[in-house]
Image (cartoon, grey):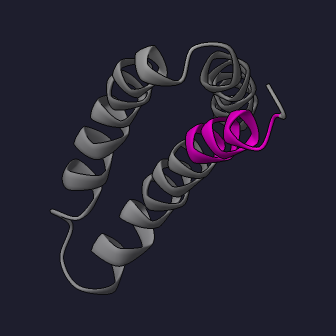
Amino acid sequence: MTIVIVAGFCVLLLIAAFVAPRMSRHLERGGQKPLGAGRRAGSKAPGFLGRLFSKPFESSQKAVSKSGSAGRSGRDKLPL
């Protein structure tokens, strides 16, 4: 379920970044905040478990960042 939510948010962010590049940065930061909180909470576990629990949030943050930058760079490549 979480994967579907993150993937849906990435698609929404990609479209928003393509349509309104400046405003999409706020949306991107708003999406990374809860993921960062989950990452910090997961990393509080001791040792190997801390890395294991924080890894899904880290990869989700990377996906959100990449989709936002991909939408903005796609907009930059338009011949308009």
Q: Which residues are magenta?
A: 67-78
Task: Name the chief secondary structure element in magenta.
Answer: helix
Q: Quarter holding the N terminus?
A: top right
For the image shown, how many numbered marks are present on the structure? 0
Magenta-drawn stretch contains 50: no
Q: Position of residue 35 (x, y in %)?
A: 37, 39
Please report the residue visible at 45 percent of the width from the left and 52 percent of the height from the top: 57
Residue 72 is drawn in which quadrant?
A: top right
The residue at the far right in this view is 79
Q: Position of residue 49 (x, y in %)?
A: 34, 75
**22 to the left or right of 21:** left
- Which one is in front, 46 or 31? 31
- Which one is in front, 37 or 31? 31
Q: Is residue 18 above or below residue 73?
A: above
**67 to the left or right of 31:** right
**39 to the left or right of 53:** left
Q: Quarter holding the C terminus?
A: top right
Please report the residue visible at 52 percent of the width from the left and 57 percent of the height from the top: 62
Q: Position of residue 22 (x, y in %)?
A: 43, 21
The residue at the far front in this view is 80
Please report the residue visible at 46 percent of the width from the left and 49 percent of the height from the top: 61
Q: Is residue 38 above or below residue 66?
A: above
Residue 14 is drawn in which quadrant?
A: top right
Q: Is residue 62 above or below residue 45?
A: above
Please report the residue visible at 29 percent of the width from the left and 56 percent of the height from the top: 42
Q: Is residue 8 above or below residue 6?
A: above
Q: Position of residue 25 (x, y in %)?
A: 39, 27
